[in-house]
Image: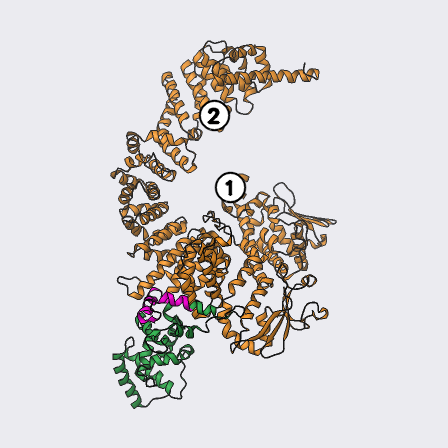
Amino acid sequence: MPEMSALNKKLTQTLAETISKQVKHFNKRETECLIRLCNGLLGDQTVSIHNSLLLLVYLAVFHTFDKDSDGYISVKEWIEGLSVFLRGTLDEKIKYCFAVYDLNSDGYISREEMLQMLNDSMIREPTEEDPDEGIKDLVEITFKRMDYDHDGRLSYADFERAVREENLLLEAFGSCLPDAESTLVFEEQAFKDPPGQ
Amino acid sequence: MGASLTRAAQWTTASSGTGKLEITPINESLLKEILSFVEQFSSRHPQEAKHVFKEPLQWSTTLVASDFKTDYDISGPTVQSQEKDSEGHPLLQLSPPTIFARSFSQLSKLVQLANDKKLKEVRACLEENRDPVVKILGPSFATVLEGEDNFVLRLVDKVKQEDQAADSALKVKLFFLLQHLDNQLLSNSLKKISQEVRLSPAAVKNEVELLKHFCSEGEKRVLKSVRYTSDYEFSNGCRTPPWRQVHGDICYLVIEPCDTETLYITCSTAGVFLNGGIKQEGEENAYERTSEMHKDLVTLLKSRSPHFAENINKQVQWNLGRCIHCYLPFVFSKTPVGVMLAEAFSESSSESEEDEEQPERRPESNTDLPSEYWQIQKLVRYLKRGNQTATVLVLCAMRDFNLVQETCQLAIRDEGGLEVLLNLLDTKEIRCKIGSLKILREISNNSQMRRAIADLCGLQSMVKSLDSLVKDLKALAAETIANVAKFRRARRTIRQYGGIMRLVKLLDIPDLATPTAEQERDVEVARCGVLALWSCSKSTRNKEAIRKAGGIPLLGRLLKLPHENMLIPVVGTLQECASERSCRIAIQTEGMIKDLVKTLSCDNQELQMHCASAIFKCAEDKQTRDLVRQYEGLQPLVLLLNKVDNKQLLAATTGAIWKCSISMENVAKFQEYNVLEILVNLLTGQPEEVLVNVVGALGECAQIPANRAIIRRCGGIQPLVNLLTRTNQALLVNVTKAVGAFFLPSFRLLWSLLKNPNVDVQSSAAWAICPCLENTKDAGEMLFYFVGGLELIVNLLKSTNKEVLASVCAVIAKIAKDEDNLAVITDHGVVPMLAKLTNTTDDRLRRHLAEAIAHCCMWGSNRASFGEAGAVAPLVRYLKSTDSSIHQATAHALLQLSKEPNNCITMHQNGVVKLLLGMMGSADEMFQEAAADCVFNIRRLALANDKASYGYPP
């Protein structure tokens, strides 16, 4: 990490102080580390972060991070996002995942959205009459399983209940959370150096 | 060396007999190891080296007399060692070209003499002595070696029977040394063989299938196409013409990579290489190899196509992991190496295979299968095609079926779902692993599935999953292992792949008073770990492995936790382990007896049963017995005796009471709780596993006279004596001991009364001894304790008192039923003394005398001796008596005596036939038969005599 000016250091610390009070799961020191990491991402400096996390910051995830939808992720949004990523409770993660899967942000996951997300999840059988039949069937099975109120769409309540019954359904329609191992590696690297030293 | 020589060494002819050892690297190293073993034997084991072989090892040597130096007597071409055996035969002898060696010390010297011919000599020796162990230790050891179960026990038996001589210990040691060498050789050569596993058609096929998956459209693809040159597959899995199969060719492939020219590939058993361009069948000149040999297709493609090499790694993590279980079973079970592996490591513990194969229940035809079957099969097909996301969804969908149902399990297996599920365990996808394990955990309740999982090497992957950082995954893997480890082979596999160590590690959770949510999950992981250890602990070697991995103290810590669902497997495992002495010591030294005693008072009967059973096993040790008393465990045990309906609990409790009562202090304590009365009540109407322990406990308690009185008072004698008719060996041992405790003291007293000078005392003591001998099963053994007692009784035959004589004859008739005792009294001259008494006219004496003679005939040449001593003629006269009980005894005695031809002559001369014929009309069938048989014996002799004299029957 390159040298920071005294002012920068001071600013970071104040910011960390404020944010750590607003965001769950991180203490001040950890927040400071994450801010510096964020600054690193913004600047030209290359920061060594575990690849898997960087890969995960793709579009949908970006949208959920960017809560005020201004097209940018603020430092606070960044830290809030990471808080769910790294240390989120099941509740927080369910909310986050639902938001990612609700592609058009209408509060429901439709069959079409589901099909769209799962489109490439199976190797097609060219020999079959309808090569997509497998995918369609799987979407149908999954949809029936999760649509508890039988209204033809998955509400947040449906999703939450399904995940609570079977935790594996948390990332049902594509992975959007780092796995335990990546989280561990990331935390180890990000919180390695106490700031200001 | 037996096993490694027959299984690992490569012989030129498969059959045994005189084959030649092929010159291969494996044999070479085998020979070298055997050579160094022999070379160092003398210095390492000087005692054993002197042991003289049962039979000499002999072979044709290239050594000549001039090679031998000091310590040998050389005369011309022949050589003899100066070292001789006890009978003066030389231990080494050379009469060219054959050499005989009869001890390891000579063999050691020999290889040292042989210098650069060492290996040659060892080779020749092994080639001509295919079963060296048998020659060294004798043929009986071959059978010991062959059956792997129980072999130590049988070994000990063998040595015991064979000779009592001092060298038996030496023999055992030698045997173990050889056995050890054998194991070492085997495992070393296995290492070598497993490096050279050759390709099989199935493995090639799997790899081709895998590569076909990479030929999809779009950016991800790593290959353009993969195809066989021939669609026809022979029944052996090959796609090459038979005349090429001879060369090991399995199939020819045409593979189009994305970035280089088309590759023409031959897959053969030796490996994979490029050929001269076989595009279709029958291109004669293209078979030769044009590239180097690769071990599989992926390596070959990596070396040829940079694009493939670059992209395959990205996809292969997911996909290769997914095919490993299609390969492994072939590597491990279908190849000779695999079979060998399985044999070489087969368990030697004596446990039985408790997990019996269930017959497969399957509807007659496919149309009878319910719709679930087809739905699950469809899901399995999706599972094979799906990526990580789809896989998880399919797994969840499968979980919605009732997987306990056999139809669903069969559907998964029939469609190859087990392989896919197990393959998922080798990917990096945690959610897929969890999903897969959730299904495997359910279906592994079925023994067929368990076996299939083990056959597909699934346990190895589960064991690996125990290292994961994800707690849920660890817990699930452990739980599934607990289910699968219901049969011996599975338990062995788990141990061999380091499962025990990993499972024990799961138990290492901090001591927690108030655990957090996260720590609760640790507790759950530990619980699953214990469940798995419980299943595993049913194999002897696993018990030891658990102890070595430090499992006992960890179990001890868990024993202090309040959770009942944790305690049952913990105590269950402890009680399984407690059958090993080393584990018992650990349990005791870790201070667990206190906790076990405490847990005895819980209100869960299953838990109480395991606790009692652990105490049962541990209380073999005196210190443990004392600890149980100190921690006040005796009363709770007695209280548990009230739960008469739970037979398992009752068996464990009575067992614990039995073992605890070996210590007299405990017996005194038990008496305070009136345990004897309760135990006596349990003597009737209980299953044998309870009876064994109850009688055992009574036997221990009865060592104290006061307790004998109590047992007698509550009517314990009759039921105890009744148990003497049972056939259960363990029960009989205990019953005899208990009954003995009652009779032995009085019996001893009676016996000493025989020495009393008063003839009335003598005779009444002898009369009293008779029923004792009759009622005690092992009377013979009991008499064994009275050194000099038998001589005493024989000497009493010199008495002049008729009553004494009669009673002593009665005792002798009883004693003589035991062959060993009969031999002893014969030595003391019982035969002439009885014969001398035969002239008596006292009917009472006559009867017992006849009985005694009948029984004494059963040993050696006693029949003839009686005849020579003139006992036969007086006996015949007994038949003229009016007392029918005399007739009966006499007929039996005559029958025995008539087996000796000279006696028959005497009987005949004394007119016995007429007398006996007269008696055959008697109502007593036994008597009739004895009389008839006796006449028959006499008649037969007469016939034989006639035949000998006249050459034909008159």
Q: Which chain is green?
A: A
Closer-to-camera residue (B682/A75): A75
- Majority SS type along the magenta span: helix
Q: Residues within 10 Å of mark 2 (few under 14, many from 20)?
A: some
* Depicted B892 relative to depicted A33: above or below: above
Horizontal side, residue B176 vs residue A111: left or right:
right
Q: Position of residue B768 (x, y in %)?
A: 37, 22
* Depicted B10 relative to depicted B294: above or below: above
**SS class of the residue under badge 1?**
helix
Residue occupied by mark 1: B157
Task: Please state the chain letter of the residue tagged with numbered disc 2 in the rendered image.
Answer: B
Q: Position of residue B530 (x, y in %)?
A: 37, 57
Q: Position of residue B86 (x, y in %)?
A: 61, 42
Closer-to-camera residue (B588/B689): B689
**Magenta segment includes B491:** no
Q: Amino acid at mark 1?
A: Asp
Magenta segment, which residues?
A139-168
Name of the residue lying farthest toward the right: B76
Task: Please state the chain letter of the residue tagged with numbered disc 1 in the rendered image.
Answer: B
